[in-house]
Image (cartoon, rainbow, N blue to C red):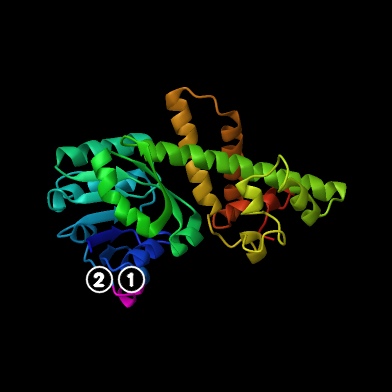
Amino acid sequence: MAKIGFIGLGNMGLPMALNLLKAGHTVKGADLSAARMADLEAAGGAAAGSATDAASGVDAVVTMLPSGREVAMLYLGDGGLLAAADKGTLFIDSSTIDVETARKVADAAAAAGQKMVDAPVSGGVGGAQAGTLTFMVGGPDADFAAAKPLLDVMGKTIVHAGGAGNGQAAKICNNMLLGISMIGVCEAFVLAEKLGLDHQKLFDISSTASGQCWSLTTYCPVPGPVPTSPANRDYQAGFAAAMMLKDLKLSQDAASHAGAATPLGAAASQAYGLFVGAGNGGVDFSGIIRFLRGAQQDA
């Protein structure tokens, strides 16, 4: 069993850390929230005094942070995680950040004699709790092999996407597709409502026809057809609209730098920007159906 430092015990990070504990690993966590730290301790984990303390004297460090800015600040420099850890420590960054920062930090890790993979996730809070996340992993073959046993505890599908930063590239592309498809599914249901077509009837048809997609069959944005979808819980966030907007912005920044045409990605980013700007950042991203109906408030 491994000694693991876990930095970032938010809605995703805490259940991931708890799954590592359940598998028999030792987990030392760090987070700005005292309540989250208490939850980790109640489950048998230890509270670190700081992020650098969490990275000291462990075999591996998992980070789940809000953005590339926080990742760079924590990892780099004389007082950063890479300097604080023992040589040969494995770093797994499961934050969703820009590709450029991921590759910069990976280069610094290699120069410091550390192992590192970028391993952003898909699957939402439910997947984190159930240990069924999908990990998109970038990094050297040897570092991926070292990380995989830990990723297997937290996820169900582990894909090595290539070199450093490729995990982030895969996550950005995937979530751009998700944002686009969710808006498409929502528009179809809004049109069906206007035409007098029942939600369940549209679901029964499209879920077995050419309109079938994950946003429809697993995360249906209207109550009823998929009982486990957030639509049945007043759009309580499994994946918040603010997080979707963040990922869509990353996709558009990446598209700009790469010279890729993503007009639907740009349109989805604009739509979620309006939705979040109307005060819906904490609503599940499928709740954008309310916005498409013309509701500008939490309803």
Could you tell me if the residues under marks 1 and 2 are in contact, i.e. CB atoms within 8 Å?
yes
Name the residue beneath numbered marker 2: 46
Q: Which quadrant would the N terminus be assigned to in this image?
A: bottom left
Rounded to the nearest whole Å, what is the CA distance between mark 1 and mark 2? Answer: 7 Å
Secondary structure at badge 2 equals strand
Horizontal relation, residue 27 to residue 228: left or right: left
Which residue occupies 51% across, 42% down? Answer: 175
Position above or below: 115 against 152 = above
Can residue 48 be seen here? The reply is yes
Mark 1 or mark 2, which has the lower sequence index?
1
Q: Position of residue 198 (x, y in %)?
A: 82, 54
Dot 1 crowding, Cα within 10 Å, few <14, some 14–19, many 20+: many
Q: Position of residue 295 (x, y in %)?
A: 72, 53
Name the residue beneath numbered marker 1: 40
The quadrant holding residue 59 is bottom left
Which residue occupies 84% across, 47% down? Answer: 194
* Amino acid found under the numbered disc labelled 1: Leu
* Amino acid found under the numbered disc labelled 2: Ala
Horizontal relation, residue 69 to residue 216: left or right: left
Does the magenta portion include 42?
yes
Q: Which mark is residue 167?
A: none
Secondary structure at badge 1 equals helix
